[in-house]
Image: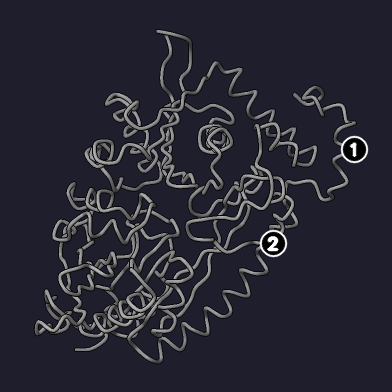
Amino acid sequence: MPHGGAPAPMSADTAPDAGTGEPRIRVHDALADIPASAWDALAGEQLFLRHAFLRAFEDTGAVSPGTGWTPCHLGLWQGGALVAAMPLYLKAHSRGEYVFDHAWADAWQRSGMEYYPKLLSAIPFTPVTGRRLLARDAAARAQLAQAVVGFARRLQVSSLHVLFPIEDDRRALADAGLLTREGVQFHWRNGARAAEGHAAATPAPGLRLDAGGERFTSFEDFLATFNHDKRKKIRQERRRVHDAGIRFRRLRGRDIGEADWAFFHRCYSDTYHRHGQRPYLDLSFFLQLADTCPEDLLLVLGSRGEGAQAVPIACALDVHSGERVYGRYWGGTEWHSGLHFETCYYQSIEYCIDAGAEVFEGGAQGEHKLARGLAPTLTRSVHWLAHPRFAEAVGSYLERESRGIAHYVDELAEHAPFRRAAGDAAAREASPDAAGGADR
């Protein structure tokens, strides 16, 4: 039954290989079936795509048929070598994705069809732009893009969704017939020129950014790009946290101990419970990451009090991978004015400045990030829908949605916190707060 019946059983091979050396698509129901070295050779430097990171979801049960995530990763093999691969899941719901298709599911099911299961290529629970077609060259990328659409047709699923792909992958998937959807996140960029150009949203660049100017040398250097009122507000927020006796440590890699991880997971879980949700990940997931790929992990830990009397009260987990820092999870056991912004944003921005990182990605959504110096940045996803008329309707909707997003970004630009004119620098130097006096 097409477009909503039970999907056909997944096969280990979706194309024949008669020993000719021709490329062959295989479906892998566990990442453990693919050698880590072969996968990582295609994945690049970003932690979220590495074999160890993705495998931790499966090993700890966060991603499994029981949680509505059935792994069905695609591999393009040639002569015994993996030449392209794609993280892929058969989904029984739309949770943990950050690109929302609930309205599509409702409309599909009102038409008498079953929207779930659907196919999803994404990093589970992680709204981060990166490679989705892991390929050695453009030809392998194009072949994999065509193969995943063919796989969706064979399974007779309602739809295929590829979330937050880099531009090369998006184009290859668009050429295979997928529709492009735009969204907005808020990212911080390291450099005064990036702040001056904040008014226009820029596409998420994937894995690298041309810095386009000198990087900030300190948090005060960053604040100097703000207008007076916004700069004053941030200094006041930071001062309230400091005056509450809260001090911060930033722990990297194996410096994060088991007690630190236990406290972090307590805070992480509490954040989900406060929003009426069950946390996706248990402590074993984070401990496995700490064991297999600790070098990219950064824990911001806030404590109230001094020395042996210090009590941990808040923390945030970041990932520093390549030239980017990604804000992932946060939580706290006490409320203090400004604590959320200090823990989640200001500490991470200071870290980026100290470490020379080019970008801090603040995660999904959150207009409050704009006032903290994070700029609107376009993200993209691509979608294939099995039913032709439904696909046509969604295509029209996405065109309207993109126009709305452009208008939304223009509105955001009107509320940018940065100084409007480059010539304002001289006035700033002469102002009472240039040395941090009047509004501290």
Instruction: Read off the residue under disc 1.
Output: 427
Left or right relative to 347: residue 92 = left
Relative vertical location of residue 252 with respect to residue 17 in this rendering, above or below = above
Q: Which mark is residue 168?
A: none
| Dot 2 amino acid type | Ala
Helix, strand or loop at mark 2: loop
Instruction: Read off the residue under disc 2.
Output: 200
Question: Within the image, what quadrant is residue 236 found in?
Answer: top right
| Dot 1 amino acid type | Ala
In the rendered structure, are the residues bearing label 1 and label 2 in contact, judged by CB atoms less than 8 Å apart? no
Q: Nearer the viewer, residue 75 or 90?
A: 75
- Residue furthest out toward the bottom: 389
Relative vertical location of residue 247 with respect to residue 231 in this rendering, above or below = above
Q: Earlier in the sequence, mark 1 or mark 2?
A: 2
Tell me what residue is drawn at x 68 percent, y 69 percent. Answer: 407
Q: Position of residue 37 (x, y in %)?
A: 22, 55
Q: Position of residue 376 (x, y in %)?
A: 61, 57
Q: Nearer the viewer, residue 396 or 294?
A: 294
Left or right relative to 142: residue 245 = right
> The C terminus lies in which quarter of the figure?
top right
Q: Position of residue 35 (x, y in %)?
A: 17, 57
Q: Nearer the viewer, residue 435 or 314?
A: 435
Question: Separation of disc 1 and disc 2 at Cα?
Answer: 25 Å
Tell me what residue is drawn at x 31 percent, y 29 percent. Answer: 254
Tell me what residue is drawn at x 42 percent, y 78 percent. Answer: 172
Q: Nearer the viewer, residue 83 or 92?
A: 83
Left or right relative to 182: residue 145 = left
Q: How would you rate the neighbour count of disc 1 (Cα within 10 Å): few for under 14, some for 14-19, many for 20 or more?
A: few
Tell me what residue is drawn at x 38 percent, y 70 percent. Answer: 162
- Residue furthest out toward the top: 308
Helix, strand or loop at mark 1: helix
Left or right relative to 83: residue 364 = right
